[in-house]
Image: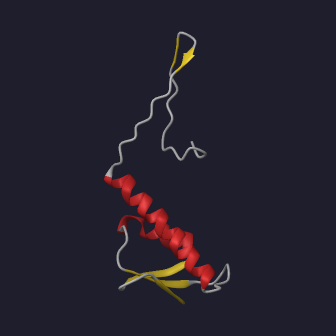
Amino acid sequence: KDELNLKNVEIEEGKGELAVQLDTKITAELEDEGWARDLVRQIQKKRKDERCGLSDKIKVILPRWPHQYEDYIKSQTLSHSLNTGSELAIKKA
């Protein structure tokens, strides 16, 4: 699952064959999760560009973000807070 970035795997055996079916439907929830993961990547790059240490807490400024993933974004990026602004920026907390 993790290697293929899948949410769920169901295995069905029949007549000695293994069949694989993929549900490629992108739901609103999956889209928001992907957006949150991309924001984490962008924030981590910004942390690196700003030479933040591994334990440095930061404040993040973003135009918008998926609010249901706010805790995830903050925990993955060591962010003290997410604030609304015109573009992505970080400040040491």
Quadrant for the C terminus in the image: bottom right
Q: Residue furthest left?
A: 28
Residue 13 pos. (x, y %): 53, 18
- Residue 36 is situated, as x and y percent measured from the top left of the image, at 44, 65
Q: Is residue 3 left or right of residue 59?
A: right
Direction from residue 62 to residue 56 in the image, left or right: right
Residue 74 in the image: above or below residue 84? above
The colouring scheme, among rainbow, by chain, secondary structure or one colour, is secondary structure
Residue occupying image coordinates x 66% and y 80%: 55
Residue nearest the viewer, comparing 86 with 69? 86
Q: Is residue 51 above or below residue 44?
A: below
The x and y percentages for residue 10 are: 49, 30
Q: How many marks?
A: 0
**In percent of the image, x 51 and y 69: which residue is there?**
40
Residue 58 coordinates in the image, percent (x, y): 54, 84
User: Could you tell me which residue is drawn at 48 percent across and 44 percent down?
Assistant: 7
Q: Residue at x 67, y 83 (%)?
A: 53
Locate the N terminus by quadrant: top right
Which of 75/66 is in front?
Answer: 66
Give the quarter of the image for residue 86.
bottom left
Q: Residue furthest top?
A: 15
Q: Is residue 56 above or below residue 44?
A: below
